[in-house]
Amino acid sequence: MLDPECVRTLLAVVDEGTFDAAAKALHVTPSAVSQRVKQLEQRTGRVLLVRAKPARLTESGAVIARYGRQQALLDHDALTALGLVEDPTPVAVAVNADSLSTWFRRVVKELAADDGLVLAVRRDDQDHTADLLRQGLVVAAVTSSPRPVQGCRVRPLGSIRYHAVASKRFVRRHLDAGTPLHEAPVVVFDEKDDLQDAFCRTETGRPAAAGRRHHLPDGHVFEDAVVSGAGWALLTEHQIARHRGLVHLAPGRPVDVPLHWQQWKLDSPPLARVADAVLRAAAAELH
């Protein structure tokens, strides 16, 4: 058996980022945190943490983290059913930025009246949210991967549709002046955002301009940059509808990114309510 206190301490180190921060969260000394993690590593015979800032789970540590979060969720559900706790159940999910700023807002609105749970959303690229599941950092994720993470079930949600667009000013200044699309300034969300590169390879056989990229990891700022003419990018239909005068750079050739809902195979009522809300929102707004 794994010591529950040691497992909770491991999770605290990962969530807080350092041993000192975990100690403050748990109201113990940093030495106690270190001893508990070492005890867990001795019990399993594995290194569970990369001692860095922030601390990171090893592959073995991710297994323990998944176990710990699953156990914590089930314990909370049982105590709630017995009337022994009144605190809402925390449900940690990973969602990509474009979903967060568009259709996932419907999920948040639906669950706003649910006093039995609180959402804790981690934002990451849809190609990487499954990694957060694999590491045990979340219990469910909106992901582009149809392959289930071990211990998870997968359900298709539909596709989020993108169009390559730019402002009229940008088109006149760059594309009408003869600049090839792959050499024109481009807006990307962050270093994980491969959407513009993939589109450019399809259209021109080359990735987007490596030296003329605006990295803007905020949905509204990203949109503003495209609207103001800083660069071209792929925007969702929801985002395009908020702005007038954008020019479609490839009319009739949208890019559809299939999304899936992955969640742990747990009989947890709060998790089931989140999943139902996600499926309803996706059915209403995704292709």
Image (cartoon, rainbow, N blue to C red):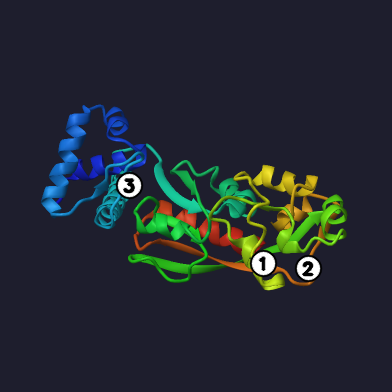
Residue kind at label 3, given as amino acid type: Arg
- Identify the secondary structure beneath mark 1: helix
Q: First in sequence: mark 2 or mark 3?
A: 3
How many other residues sit within 10 Å of disc 3, few (<14), some (14-19) or many (≥20)? some
Q: Nearer the viewer, residue 12 or 192?
A: 192
Residue kind at label 1, given as amino acid type: Phe
- Identify the secondary structure beneath mark 3: strand
State the residue position of label 3: 56
The location of residue 151, given as percent across then percent down, is 33, 65
Q: CA distance from mark 1 to mark 3?
A: 33 Å
Q: Along the horizontal axis of the image, is 149 left or right of 246?
A: left
State the residue position of label 2: 250
Q: Along the horizontal axis of the image, is 105 left or right of 42?
A: right
Q: Are marks 1 and 2 in contact (CB under 8 Å)?
A: yes
Q: Nearer the viewer, residue 86 or 89?
A: 89
Q: What residue is drawn where x is 40% and y is 67%?
A: 153
Say how many tags the image has. Answer: 3
Q: What residue is drawn where x is 40% and y is 69%?
A: 148
Residue 199 numbered tag = 1
- Identify the secondary structure beneath mark 2: loop
The location of residue 197, given as percent across then percent down, is 63, 63
